[in-house]
Image (tube, rainbow, N blue to C red):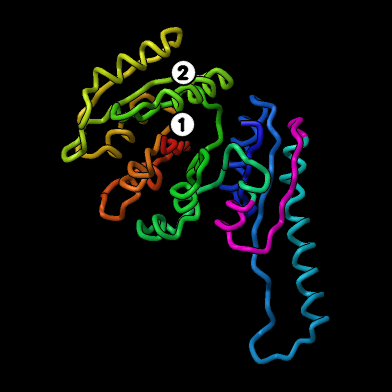
Amino acid sequence: MKKILVATDFSENAQIALQYAIEIGKAYQSELYLLHTYLPLYTEHGIYTSAKSLQESMDKQRLTLKADMTPSVDAVVEAGLSCMPLLEMTDVASGVFEAVEKFDIDLIVMGRTGSGGFFDKLIGSNAAHITAKAPIPVLTIPAQTQAKEVKHILYATQLEFDEIAVLQQVFDLAHQLKAQVSLVKVNAPFEPDVHTDNQYIKEINEAFVKEDFTLQQIAANSVAEGILVTAQAKNADLIVLAAHHRNFLTQLIDPSKSQQVIVRAAIPVLTFQLSES
């Protein structure tokens, strides 16, 4: 995670997300890219404005936003990390994906906000949309999160396919942050159970024989409910999900589900997209 992109709207939630990005950045000695996207301010309808006046208005808007970004940039630099501010006139998702491709970003960090309604949080949340589409890991920070050290990571395993590559990154993150790792497999009604769990448990134990972790299987009404309840019971500071071909994540944020991890978690959620291979 040498290059971390932090999407910010200068809100309190965004500042907490930045704190998490800085802590991870310090652990990996990463370069932080601080992105704010915006749309131009236009004059009232019906009032004639010259091209010169319009350009002056846009220049003033950009200068104001640069000033708004300065405290965040200073916070990154004061933490001993390099920071590249990005101010782009576009929508949030486009700005994020363009920056990811242009700068070869390894991790996206962003706050998750909403007015409180389930539908608004699900459909209107840039974080949920970007998480579902991003080809790289995304760390979403709920609005109610209080910034603190990550000392306990809960990884939600599916035991349905090879997760070794993702788990290697999870354990590496745990080492960098000096955190404990717990794995949980949630058995819920109507969830696919194609492969024998023992096969994948054996593979995980053999691959990480030197790691200190626990692997627990629980029953719950839904996968999301089981993950959230386990995270609370273990006092986890971070939930990690792995999305295979986007199916698992798509299922979690499907509006027909009563509970979803990403939109309901009170702690940060880190999502990995597994490769198609």
Q: Is residue 267 visible?
A: no
Percent across and percent down for residue 253 are: 35, 49
Left or right placement of residue 224 versus residue 49 in this view: left
Who's the residue at 58% across and 20% down the image? 176
Nearest to the observer: residue 76 or residue 33: 33
Percent across and percent down for residue 66 are: 77, 56
Residue at disc 1, secondary structure: strand
Percent across and percent down for residue 270 are: 47, 36
Percent across and percent down for residue 72 are: 71, 45
Nearest to the observer: residue 264 or residue 214: 214
Q: Give the residues in magenta.
A: 78-98
Who's the residue at 62% across and 47% down the image? 101
Who's the residue at 62% across and 51% down the image? 8
Residue sitting farthest toward the front: 277
How many angstroms separate mark 2 from mark 1 (CA)? 10 Å
Which label is found at residue 180? 2
Among numbered discs 2 and 1, the one appearing first in the sequence: 2
